[in-house]
Image (tube, rainbow, N blue to C red):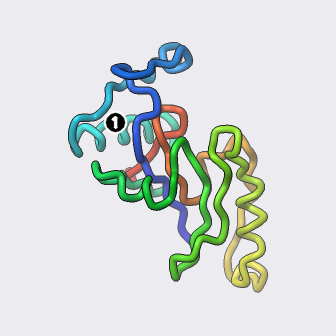
Amino acid sequence: MAFYAVYILEAHPTDIWTMQSNVKDNVLFASPKNDQERENVANACVRKLGIKFPAIVDGFDNTTEKAYTGWPDRLYLISSDGKVLYKSKPGPFGFKPDQLEGAIKKLPEVRAGFTNVVSVSSEQGANIGFFGLQGTAYQSIMGW
């Protein structure tokens, strides 16, 4: 079982919609203009949030965001054959790691004891699952 974060879009870019919480936390980024800028913002967000698992950046064409409706953020459980086994409601209010944990525990390989499942609390929400992270609220990506 692998966990990934996917950086999709900047939620509150300074050139469009600045949130007071972003100002307070000094998490201020303009909308990236190209792939390199998007990677730089994603890298900064991963470090700022302390993401400890691999992260990737959606392309500038937003293919992943379009396919999985990751905006503003979501948790997904996807089988090895690509089937969506769990899809959270949109975050941040639909961001319920305990529900993803329950879906993981129902997997046959977990029930058979082949995979360890770590208990997840809502404070660790950014630490589980495949999910689209958007903006500075839950950003991530690239395996740094």
Relative to 100, say whether 140 is above or below. Answer: above
Residue 58 vertical placement versus 9 (above, below): below
Q: Percent x, y for residue 135?
A: 46, 35
In the rendered image, residue 18, in percent from the top left (x then y), is placed at 45, 18
- Find residue 108 and report its horizontal and vertical position in percent: 73, 84
122 up-or-down from 29: above or below: below
| Three-letter residue code for mark 1 | Val
Asked whether, in this view, residue 132 is left or right of residue 75, the answer is left
| Front residue of this view, candidates 4 and 7 | 7
Image-quadrant location for residue 31: top left
Element type at mark 1: helix
- Residue 11 in view, yes or no: yes
Q: Is residue 52 visible?
A: no
Where is residue 2 shown, x and y percent of the image? Answer: 54, 68
Q: Which residue is mark 1?
A: 41
The residue under the point 76% across, 85% down is: 112
Q: Is residue 18 left or right of residue 29?
A: right
Q: Residue at x 54, y 59 (%)?
A: 130
